[in-house]
Amino acid sequence: MAMNRRDTFKLAGVAAVAATLPTMAGASEAKSTAKKATGKSIVVIGGGFGGLTIAKALRKKDASLEVTVIEKSNMFMACPFSNTLLGGLDGVNLDTFVGDYYQPAAKHGYSFVHATVTAIDRKAKTVTTTDGDFAYDILVLSPGIAYDYENQFPEWSQDKIREIAQACPAALMPGNEHVALKRQLDNMDDGNVIIVPPPSGKFRCPPAPYERTSMVANYIKNEGIKGKVIVLDTRPGKFAKAKAFKESWTEIFPDIIDYRGESTVTDVDVAKKTITYTDADGDSHTEAYEVCNLIPLNKCSPVITMAGIETNGAGFALMDGYSFKSKTDSNIYVVGDAVTHAIPPSGQTAIWAAHRAAGQIIAQLGGKVDDPKKGLPAKAANVCFSMVGGKPEEAIMVTHTFSADPSGVLKGKGNVPKPKDGNGKYRSKGTAKATREWFNGVMREMFT
Ligand SMILES: Cc1cc2nc3c(=O)[nH]c(=O)nc-3n(C[C@H](O)[C@H](O)[C@H](O)COP(=O)(O)OP(=O)(O)OC[C@H]3O[C@@H](n4cnc5c(N)ncnc54)[C@H](O)[C@@H]3O)c2cc1C
């Protein structure tokens, strides 16, 4: 194989991209002391899409509010658009995705605490963290998701789960997993990349595994790697934006993408680099891989359970009607992926929810009720783009309108449009441009 850009990466390794990271302070220098809530104290757990948006929105609406964001990571990294890093798109590097928590906190006057939440006492209205206790009048939970390897592979030991999680990084949560997957692609020789979407249930960003399929295929094509992207999916070909993805796969990467529906993964041998799965007829197959991206079942972050509020079977918070208030406790709000509203778990939805929840909280603190049906149905409340090609850059999109469903929850109805500049196709260059603009916009929403 000819010396190419991947070989350069092999030598430079992740150090090259790591050099672009901003320097982050360690755990917060000053220990926080638990002080009494003032009647206007709002504690936000999770400095991700939902948490950072609501902290800023609350302070912008009412500068007398005392808002504290508690976040366990010491560096923000965005998941949306991150598949383009794997795809090697122009101008995209790790720096594209990182954010500095301190800057928006200072600008909008909320406190940022770098600590992990370990307990919530709803009676005392306090949150316990690795850096002290915090009292609240209103608590906002936006802790995101967790992986559920245990339910999907009950026969795997904890050691085996750890080994496979590291060897076949899921990269559905921000941070090291994305770097690990990128490094594996940079280092791979000829051979196959296997992508395994979560087998069932609600999972973070339903189009993400399929966008990743396109972007890894783009990488394989541009780098001249002799290999395929094999998707082992339990679904029989029905997934988010399926028609639009399949159109682009057939037309852009016909010899690279190999989608195998009704495939259930049963085992991974990390030493041999093989994955075993059963097909629709129950026959077992073993496939060799160079890189494997195994995304397990999702469950809700355990922070929701810590709060002791009512949840569904997978730990997601039950909601009070169409609002973003917990069904159990009127002083607890939940936004982002952790809610049970029938709306897709996405960054855009988390931002939309955070703005609505901010209005509802401010009304509550003022002794009023913000009508949870206000502004519904909300047209294009969720817009989700997926990059499907790199040369030229092309993307597809889905929009969702959110409505008050008679069943009592917010419900999203999706539409995958064909763009005007698409010449009858689902994908277009204009949509790719909109994808980059959308991503820059959400980063501005949280960090400026
Ligand atoms: C590959 C990929 C592509 C995606 N593409 C898109 C897209 O194109 N468009 C889109 O809209 N969305 C996209 N998403 C989805 C989007 O990233 C999530 O839906 C969004 O981040 C959810 O926001 P959140 O606030 O619920 O969770 P997060 O943003 O994950 O934030 C949760 C935060 O809580 C913190 N936390 C958790 N537990 C604790 C604790 N005990 N103590 C302190 N802090 C804690 C976590 O560290 C984290 O920072 C994509 C996701 C992935 C993985």
Image (cartoon, grey):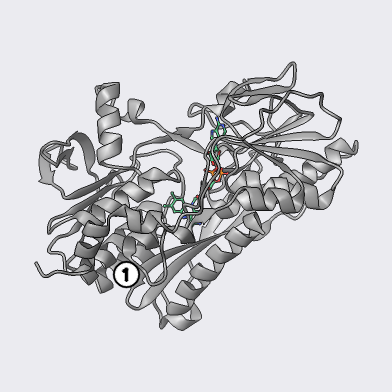
Residue 197's x, y, as percent? 33, 46
As drawn, 309 above or below 234: above
Inspect this view and state whether residue 136 appears: yes
Seen in the image, is 235 located left or right of residue 107? Answer: left
Count of numbered badges drawn on the protein = 1
Residue 327's x, y, as percent? 69, 29
Kind of residue sitting beneath label 1: Ser
- Toward the top, the furthest residue is 123
As drawn, 138 above or below 207: above
Q: Quadrant of residue 28?
A: top right
| Disc 1 secondary structure class | helix
Q: Where does label 1 land, which residue?
A: 248
Residue at 41% x, 70% y is 91
Residue at 74% x, 21% y is 125
Residue at 22% x, 57% y is 10
Inspect this view and state whether residue 258 appears: no
- Toward the right, the furthest residue is 367
Residue 349's x, y, as percent? 59, 51
Residue at 74% x, 23% y is 34
Residue situated in front as seen by the camera: 96 or 336: 96
Seen in the image, is 286 located left or right of residue 334? Answer: left
Residue 179's x, y, as percent? 35, 50
Quarter placement of the C terminus = bottom right
